[in-house]
Amino acid sequence: MKICIVGAGYVGLTASVALARSGHQVITVEKDKSRLNRLRQGVSTIYEPGVNDLLRAEEVKGKLTFTDTLVDGLADAQIAMVAVGTPSLSDGRIDLTAINEVCQEIACIARSRLIVVMKSTVPPGTGKRLCERFFSSCPADIRYVSNPEFLREGSALHDWYHPDRIVVGSSDLGAAKDVLTLYEDIEAPKLVVSVASAELAKYASNAFLATKISFINEVANLCELVGADIEEVAAALGQDSRIGHKFLKAGIGYGGSCFPKDTKALDYVSSFNGYTFSVLKAVIEVNVRQRIRAVHKLSLTLGGLGNKRIAVLGLAFKPETDDVREAPALDIINYLVSEGATVTAYDPVACENARKHLAQGVLICEDPYDATRGCQAILVATEWDEFTTLDWSRVKQQMREPFLVFDGRNCLDAERLRSLGFLYIGVGRGYGLARVTAE
Ligand code: UGA
């Protein structure tokens, strides 16, 4: 099939290289000139394992090209896949400006039969409104399909080829079937549903995963009060196949471009429709509190934050990405600075992206040993392998008392660190605030 993909962000570029590799003829529209130039030279604009290699290979084969105009992109295309940004507004609403502009342009340009596939995450009801506003009055035969993505950053290509399900929402069964042919080479349950159901399925999936995280974080907080260990509790919980082990990792909370935005947007959509989604509100609140709680724990253990030197290891919202959007580390660093602490920070790949979000005076270091030199406390905010395999004896030698390591992702070997003389605290690791402060 000839596919025009609009937008070369995480979703658009992953879809572009994957669909080209599946044998489709793909042309991707990227309006930003410098990104376009890099893509045309075979250089990926996102940090995503495997994407760069596929990009080069498919460009060389001529299966994937890039343009900056929709007119070029849509020429001969049978499918227009929309993958542009849907940022959050301060009240939780989704800013649909880019979606509206692209759909309006497609409606103006399209001359023959075209299927518009919505890949961007848009609130339930959006597809219906887009059809009413732009496509139903369009002289070309435009059919609309919602086809949400469930890709994780850092493993987007793997998730593309091994999805748990493919969801296609449309009121036109023929269009839905045509879109499913894009995934002929992928083995997964394929669900054809209504547009609104597909849209809500995407939000509900992310909200449910976020719920698991906030739930386990609350259990972890309780562990600290009753002397239980969240790793043991989660292992026992996850053994129940109805619950499962995934997304039961306690820590300083979820971040990224999806969970924070999607939970707030779903809360807004619920309220807008006259419904109070109480569980979701609690999930969001717990996630905010978890960051503040981290600062509180550091403060209690250090006897205040004024003039304390704290190293934060990890700035990305999770490992294997340079994405710092809504990363817990950034909020925590800025709280620490406003409480008078001196903060040094290090991340294997996200330093540049983080810089503009950090308070003045935060020193970003070239390596973890520089970052931790002379500090009284370390917060591990992202579970990069580099931190689990750090030479912790070396770190200890150059730190100052009380040699505090706050493992915000429960990724370190607690017993080993304690045996090296660190004051180790994690999240819910049977080592409550009461015990820490008593020592
Ligand atoms: C998430 C979903 O997992 C994808 O299915 C979805 O397609 C994507 O959002 C999206 O909507 O585009 P992603 O944001 O890449 O993917 O990251 P996740 O791996 O889901 O992690 C999100 C956050 O949750 C991270 O900050 C991570 O540290 C945190 N997390 C995850 C926990 O705190 N505990 C866990 O057990 C799991």
Image: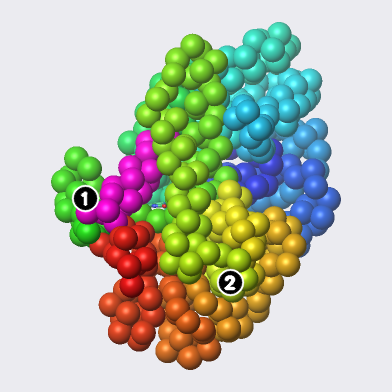
Residue 352 in percent (x, y) is at 70, 65
Question: Where does the C terminus fall, quadrant-wise?
Answer: bottom left
Residue 23 in percent (x, y) is at 54, 48
Residue 33 in percent (x, y) is at 83, 50
Residue closer to the observer: 436 or 377: 436
Q: CA distance from mark 2 to mark 1?
A: 39 Å
Residue closer to the observer: 7 or 109: 7
Q: Is mark 1 within 8 Å of ligand 1?
A: no
What segment is highlighted magenta in the picture?
207-226
Residue closer to the observer: 165 or 312: 312
- Let me know if residue 108 is in the magenta part: no
Secondary structure at numbered mark 1: helix
Per the rendering, the mark at residue 308 is: 2
Residue 364 in view (yes/no) = yes
Q: Residue at image x 62%, y 71%?
A: 307
In the rendered structure, the answer to whether residue 193 lies left or right of residue 304 reads left
Instruction: Answer few, some or many: residues within 10 Å of disc 1's Cα (few below 14, many 20 plus, some between 14 and 19).
Output: some
> In this picture, is 194 found above or below 207?
above
In the rendered structure, the answer to whether residue 411 lies left or right of residue 149 reads left
> In this picture, is 135 found above or below 425?
above
Q: Which residue is mark 1?
A: 238
Q: Amino acid at mark 2?
A: Lys
Residue 149 in percent (x, y) is at 49, 39
Which quadrant of the view contains residue 252? bottom left
- Let me know if residue 215 is in the magenta part: yes
